């Protein structure tokens, strides 16, 4: 480390070279000459000083030329995307350039390592996403193919079979349409292309409408949809009513999918100053802690076989997250295995 510090600039390197060369030359001159001692010392000093000066200047010129021709292009390459930074290189002192280059190369290498790690992670997500899309689309397509083949093999002439299989085909087609529509929506949300139609509305009324829309689905598992208390007054929020309706629908249907028989889904609305917090709580199967960080990812399923049996697209929670974040609000989840799950999100109140 000490040697590295000594020779880290062109001047110090040239100085060391000049000292070494002058010492060697001086000793050689002393060895081959046979003049008097006083003359010898004076001549040796003058000769050594001359050699030192010439060597130092030549070394400094050569090292600086090397820096200019080899090091500066490399340094500029580091800032090839930043013209202002690259132009500054021409103004740097040669002594500072090597130190700056060493530091920036280290920073550059670390940043590229991080970038490579991010790209690898994105590639893993891409492959996982494509695999999930393929699987989600194949299931209803294969179902439709099976129903059609059954009808073609004679089932079409049997009224008890053809109607049942046509209804199943319609159900699979609707699931395909749902997947495609959700994919289109989440693509727009992630690209920031979906325009929000902001308006003032009563969040209590919207939750009531969600309960009415899902009442029959909840009855199939004898799940009770309710508020945590009676809300006698309207609670106004400022948001895109259509999208928030979708958020409430997705969270509520999710609680039904993963709820226990004879369970309960409870929605609460809390005033928290300039915002309103909405919570959707169930006493269902819950989510393992290891799955919570990925719960809002596209097509991520905690229980894959159970989710597909219920008919979900696997995009509901991802859509919820993007809609809430599109409103510049926050969404969170709390859960423990076999102890239920609570999703919460915030919305702005209307401005006065």
Image (spheres, rainbow, N blue to C red):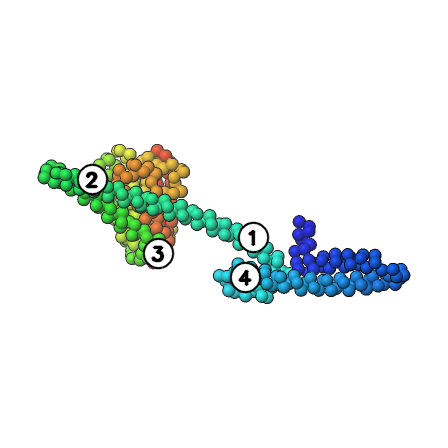
Q: Residue at x 30, y 48 (%)?
A: 247
Name the residue beneath numbered marker 1: 106
> Residue at the location (77% across, 56% down)?
24
Q: Are marks 2 and 4 in contact (CB under 8 Å)?
A: no
**Can see residue 327?**
no
* Horizontal side, residue 191 vs residue 79: left or right: left
> Mark 4 sits on what residue?
76
Mark 4 or mark 3, whichever is nearer to me: 4
Task: Find numbered disc 4 in the image and state the secondary structure of the residue it sits on.
Answer: helix
Q: Is residue 82 above or below residue 201?
A: below
Which of the two labelled residues, at mark 1 and mark 3, occupies the earlier sequence position? 1
Left or right of 138 in this view: 127? right
Cα gap from disc 2 to disc 4, whole angstroms: 63 Å
Spatial CA span between label 2 and label 3: 39 Å
SS category of the residue bearing label 1: helix
C-beta proximity under 8 Å, tags 2 and 3? no
Instruction: For label 1, count other residues whose C-alpha is less than 10 Å away and answer few (under 14), some (14-19) or many (20+).
Output: few
Which image quadrant is residue 99 in? bottom right
Residue at figure coordinates x 68%, y 63% from the top left: 60
Estimate the x, y position of residue 326 in percent, counting from the top left.
Answer: 35, 53
In terms of secondary structure, where does tag 2 sit? helix
Q: Specify whether 60 is left or right of 295.
A: right
- Give the image location of residue 277, x and y in percent: 35, 47
Q: Position of residue 192 (x, y in %)?
A: 35, 56
Where is mark 2, residue-wise? Answer: 146
Earlier sequence position, callout 2 versus callout 3: 2
**Mark 3 — residue?**
192
Residue nearest the observer in this picture, 322 or 90: 90
Q: Position of residue 168 (x, y in %)?
A: 18, 41
């Amino acid at each position: 480390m000490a040697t590295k510090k000594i020779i880290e600039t062109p001047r110090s390197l040239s100085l060391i070279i000049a000292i070494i060369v002058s010492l060697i030359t001086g000793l050689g001159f002393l060895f081959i000459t046979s003049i008097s001692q006083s003359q010898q010392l004076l001549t040796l000093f003058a000769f050594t000083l001359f050699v030192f000066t010439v060597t130092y200047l030549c070394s400094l010129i050569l090292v600086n030329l090397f820096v200019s021709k080899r090091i500066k292009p490399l340094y500029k390459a580091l800032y090839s995307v930043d013209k202002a930074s690259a132009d500054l290189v021409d103004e740097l002192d040669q002594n500072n350039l090597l130190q700056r280059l060493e530091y920036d190369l280290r920073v550059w290498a670390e940043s590229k390592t991080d970038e490579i790690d991010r790209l690898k992670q994105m590639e893993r997500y891409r492959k996982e996403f494509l695999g999930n899309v393929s699987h989600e689309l194949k299931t209803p397509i294969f179902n439709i193919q099976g129903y059609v083949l059954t009808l073609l093999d004679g089932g079409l002439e049997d009224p008890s079979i053809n109607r049942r299989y046509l209804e199943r085909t319609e159900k699979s087609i609707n699931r395909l349409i749902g997947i495609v529509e959700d994919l289109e929506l989440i693509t727009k949300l992630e690209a920031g292309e979906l325009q929000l139609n902001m308006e003032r509305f009563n969040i209590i009324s919207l939750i009531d409408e969600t309960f009415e829309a899902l009442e029959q689905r909840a009855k199939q598992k004898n799940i009770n949809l309710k508020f945590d208390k009676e809300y006698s007054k309207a609670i106004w929020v400022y948001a895109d009513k259509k999208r928030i309706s979708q958020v409430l629908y997705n969270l509520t249907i999710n609680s039904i999918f993963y709820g226990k028989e004879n369970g309960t889904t409870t929605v609460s609305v809390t005033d928290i100053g300039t915002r309103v917090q909405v919570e959707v709580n169930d006493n269902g199967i819950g989510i393992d802690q290891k799955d919570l960080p990925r719960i809002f990812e596209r097509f991520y399923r905690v229980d894959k076989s159970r989710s597909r049996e219920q008919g979900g697209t696997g995009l509901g929670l991802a859509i919820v997250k993007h809609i809430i974040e599109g409103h510049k609000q926050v969404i969170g989840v709390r859960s423990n295995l076999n102890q239920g799950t609570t999703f919460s999100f915030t919305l702005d109140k209307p401005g006065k």
